[in-house]
Amino acid sequence: MKVIADLHIHSKYSRATSEGMELEALSKWAKIKGIGLLGTGDFTHPKWIDELERKTIQSDSGFLTYDGMNFCLSAEVSCVYLQDGKLRKIHLILLCPSIEIAQQLNEALAKKGNLEADGRPTLSMSAVELCEQALEISRKNLIIPAHAWTPWFSVFGSKSGFDSLRECFGEYEKNIYAIETGLSSDPPMNWRLSKLDRVQLLSNSDSHSPEKIGREANVFELDRLTYDELYDAICSKEKRKLACTYEFYPEEGKYHFDGHKACKVSFSPQQTKEHKGICPVCKKPLTIGVLSRVEELADRPAGFVPKNAVPFENLVPLKEIIAQALNKEPTSKAVQNEYLRLIEMFGNEFAVLHAADGPLLKHAGKRFAQAIKRIREGKVKKIAGFDGQYGQIIIFDEEEAKEGQTTLGAFG
């Protein structure tokens, strides 16, 4: 069976997260998006795991269900520690096969940090120690480096990360079966490192609000919808159970290029080299983004594709497409109305984004169909994000944008 999964989100108990990140809204929006399996996020938080235990149905599958939606127990933790004379700040995703095992893991992690302080707790322990604790409790716990390339809190981050999985995880490198590419990188960037050939490249939304669920996702082909099947799909590349991933254009992520947001300086890797890594405005070191970091560690040229590479698709969120087609803000009532109309017409957001040309022309009009075609072919303008500022994917040029209409269907 085909299962679209978004395994990394947050609950309302994480900082800078919408109060709407609770089971009712999560279930509703997962269905709107077309998600079949959603991470719970934040199972380390005592209040959230209590809510999950009280409100969901638990079964032998290892997943939880609420209002017809399947949830996989997931959490993100921040390991902060000194190693080799450098302060490391590594974010890791945890997947668990049951509430009972998650509770046991929480008991162990509570000795290393205040789990009540944040849904994504800060732990005074190394990545090696975390692996040791998690795998001692259950060999079916999964540890996945989150947004593996972002500068500040990731395994390969320019500010506090490592140059290899081995350097970070030591003897537990063999237990790291996947990494999360993050919004600012995509599979082709990761394919440039031969040492990553053995791991799966997963994509998740890291959503902090319900409407952002599924902005990146994984498509699995599973025999049964169980945790064991998901575990097998992530751990075994040979079984080809990860069918593809849905990706942001990496330029749209917040850390693709180097730069300084405050100084309005955005540099490509080559420009950064020309300036020797120093901001021309404030004369301080630039925040080195994902593309430069990949260039630094890569042992293959751009464009290299490994044998049996898992396919991927670059997608743009539906509301962003509608907004550009209408030449209106994504938060406008007109965009909201069109979004709901298309969801009702096609069933869910992924169904709209993958619809055939005929139905798109009939129900959304020529302009929207043209936008989808350009996205599928990569014929869009990309303005790279940097130093915490999202990038932009521009579908229509300035003159075309002026042709936006009140309703998409008007161009049928």
Image: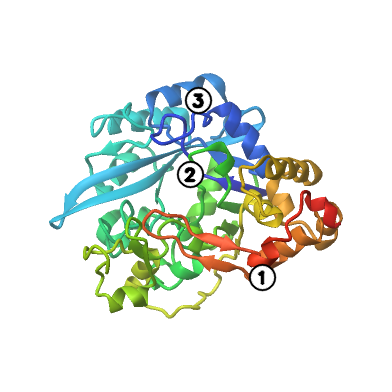
Viewed as shown, does residue 88 lie left or right of 48?
left
Residue pointed to by mark 2: 8
Q: Which secondary structure, mark 1? A: helix
Q: Which secondary structure, mark 3? A: helix
Residue density around tag 3, few if under 14, some if 14–19, many if 20 or more, within 10 Å: many
Q: Earlier in the sequence, mark 3 or mark 2?
A: 2
Amino acid at circle 2: His
Disc 3 and disc 2: Cα gap in Å? 16 Å
Q: Position of residue 360 (x, y in %)?
A: 80, 57
User: Which quadrant of the view contains residue 337?
Assistant: top right
Q: In the rendered image of this protein, does residue 76 appear above or below residue 234?
A: above
Q: Position of residue 69 (x, y in %)?
A: 63, 33
Residue pointed to by mark 3: 52
Quadrant (top left, top right, bottom left, bottom right) of the C terminus: bottom right
Between marks 3 and 2 in the image, the one whose residue lies nearer the viewer: 2
Residue pointed to by mark 1: 377
